Amino acid sequence: MLRLTERVTAWLLLLPALALLAAFTHWPALATLWHSVMSTPKKARPSRFVGLDNYRGMVEDEVFWQALWNNVIFAAGTIPLSIALAISMALWVNSRISGRGFLRLAYFTPTVLPMIAVANIWLFFYTPQYGLLEQITQALGLPSHNWLGDKHTVLGAMIVVAVWKEAGFFMIFYLAALQGISPSLAEAAALEGASRGQYFRRVLFPLLMPTTLFVLINALINSVRMVDHIFVMTRGGPDNASTLLLYYIYQVGFSFWDSGYAAALTVVVLIGLGLVAVFQFGFLERRTHYR
């Protein structure tokens, strides 16, 4: 009887969280899956079942493949740079230096800024002729360049903005992990004659791997859900060179009013993220701890 009471109490305590999870995660996911096999309702034509037509149209959609490729490049640029910069900043502000409290605040400040504010700040940096970056290049005698108007540089410019915004956030997790590592390990490595680089490579970085896995998953999600900066800075241009998947879904759903195709795009993105998450947790997690 006591065991049954404990189980009932546990489920009652979990019920509010389960209800929120079902209402705002599971139900929307199932609804999106259903809408992906339905046509978009029009004023004089109700929605009807179309099967896999929306998915077949995706195969022939050049803009979708362009957005997918852009997202791959964007993720490949932002994820390793953000992680490397976060580790470097965490190592620096974790050391015994003067003013480290100010440094921690300075590194974390971009994280708390609203995304729209960040986009407008960097829009001023990249503005041709009178932007801050243009002022620097002109002072160095370099020619003017429209960083956001050139399809060869716009994605790189957006990667810089994302890294600047996210690295400070990831630094907090690495800083917490570093403060949980015993200083005796560094002392033992020093007694064994290990250099600082060897200590980081052989001892410190392996101990940070659980944190790196967590940061890696968050960085991947952030690279896919980027939409605010694109909306303010480029609107996906020029020639779809900065269109990412979530922004394209936004365009299809709210600019073109094609809810069925937008739902199909969403399902594909969710499946892709799910497969990557399964790989990360099923394959990488086994290699992130000392055995």
Image: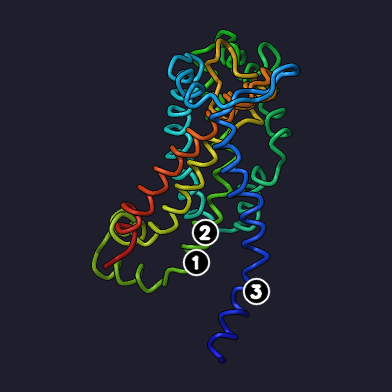
Please tell me whether mark 3 or mark 2 is closer to you in this view: 3
- Tell me if mark 3 has few (under 14), some (14-19) or many (20+) residues whose alpha carbon lies within 10 angstroms of its own: few
Which residue is labeled 1 in the image? 179
Which residue is labeled 2 in the image? 175
Q: Is residue 157 above or below residue 88?
A: above
- The kind of residue tagged 2 is Leu
Which residue is labeled 3 in the image? 12
Please tell me whether mark 3 or mark 1 is closer to you in this view: 3
Q: Is residue 125 above or below residue 82?
A: above
- Tell me if mark 2 has few (under 14), some (14-19) or many (20+) residues whose alpha carbon lies within 10 angstroms of its own: some
- Residue 161 position, x and y percent, is 59, 31
Q: CA distance from mark 3 to mark 1?
A: 36 Å
Q: Earlier in the sequence, mark 3 or mark 1?
A: 3
The structure residue drawn at horizontal position 50% and vertical position 39%, both measured from the top left corner, is 270
Q: CA distance from mark 3 to mark 2?
A: 36 Å
Q: Earlier in the sequence, mark 3 or mark 2?
A: 3
**Of the pair 19 and 214, the residue shown nearer to us:** 19
Q: Going by the image, does 209 lie left or right of 63?
A: left
The structure residue drawn at horizontal position 65% and vertical position 42%, both measured from the top left corner, is 110
- Residue 195 position, x and y percent, is 29, 58
- Residue 258 position, x and y percent, is 64, 21
Q: Are marks 3 and 1 in contact (CB under 8 Å)?
A: no
- Quarter of the image for residue 229 reads top right
Element at badge 1? helix
Residue 258's disc number = none
- The kind of residue tagged 1 is Gln
Q: Going by the image, does 211 lie left or right of 36?
A: left
Q: Is residue 246 above or below residue 201?
A: above
**Could you tell me which quadrant the C terminus lies in?**
bottom left
Colour scheme: rainbow
Q: Are marks 2 and 1 in contact (CB under 8 Å)?
A: yes
The structure residue drawn at horizontal position 69% and vertical position 36%, both measured from the top left corner, is 115
